[in-house]
């Protein structure tokens, strides 16, 4: 499911119960409204914000977050390499991805992201587990971050695929139960 509405910056949250059968791949994510969804695009406009990716066949309790942009790809730094986001003041390095954990993914949890001009933070039930700074806040003469544009929300449950893996032979159905999705803006 995709939203027709799009946003640039805000606080995004979803309350959900996740499926735990191997082969499932739940996602609450965002893609650019007008820019490329392909982060390796030579325009450097590509971006993807994965607020939640859950792949129970890999680790039933892990919740993954990623802020993919051209800046972190092999095209930007050399094939096969990935770089970190670098804090513009301190020089500290921050990964484009991280994961948190939940004891029981089939219980209700709130998965959220704070996205501003200067940073991105991810939370599970209010506890922060991801942070990345905009390495170029307010700078127009340097490559941009990829997140200075409007994004729309996507919700999906994939079965199988590269990361989801192969479902069991007796797989018949699974449910990704969503109570709500909310967007707040300052």
Image: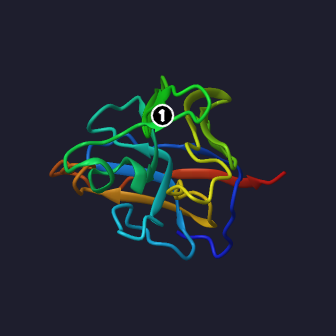
Q: Can residue 170 be seen from the camera position used here?
A: yes
User: Which residue ends up furthest to the left in the rendered image?
Assistant: 169
| Scheme of image coloration | rainbow
User: Which residue ends up furthest to the front in the rendered image?
Assistant: 141
Residue 98 in picture, x, y percent from top left = 43, 33
Judging by the rendered image, the residue that carries numbered circle 1 is 105
Q: Compared with residue 169, is residue 102 higher up or lower down, i.e. above or below?
A: above
Q: Is residue 101 left or right of residue 171?
A: right
Residue 111 in picture, x, y percent from top left = 60, 40
Residue at point 27%, 35% (across, down) = 58
Q: How many marks?
A: 1
Residue at point 33%, 38% (across, down) = 56
Q: Which quarter of the figure has residue 183?
A: bottom right
Q: Compared with residue 50, is residue 84 higher up or lower down, i.e. above or below?
A: above
Q: Is residue 179 left or right of residue 49?
A: right
Q: Is residue 37 left or right of residue 33?
A: left
């Amino acid at each position: 499911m995709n939203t027709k509405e799009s946003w640039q910056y805000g606080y995004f949250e979803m309350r959900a119960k996740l499926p735990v059968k191997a082969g499932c791949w739940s996602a609450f994510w965002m893609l650019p409204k007008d820019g490329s969804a392909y982060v390796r695009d030579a325009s450097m406009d590509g971006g993807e914000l994965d607020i939640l990716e859950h792949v129970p066949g890999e680790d039933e309790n892990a919740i993954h977050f990623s802020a993919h942009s051209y800046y972190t790809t092999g095209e930007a730094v050399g094939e096969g390499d990935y770089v970190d986001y670098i804090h513009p003041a301190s020089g500290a390095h921050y990964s484009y991805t991280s994961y948190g954990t939940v004891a029981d993914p089939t219980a209700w949890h709130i998965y959220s992201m704070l996205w501003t001009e200067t940073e991105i933070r991810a939370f599970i039930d209010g506890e922060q587990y991801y942070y990345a700074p905009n390495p170029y806040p307010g700078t127009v003469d340097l490559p941009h971050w990829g997140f200075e544009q409007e994004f729309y929300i996507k919700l999906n449950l994939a079965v199988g695929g590269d990361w989801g893996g192969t479902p069991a032979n007796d797989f018949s159905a699974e449910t990704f139960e969503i109570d709500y999705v909310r967007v707040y803006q300052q």
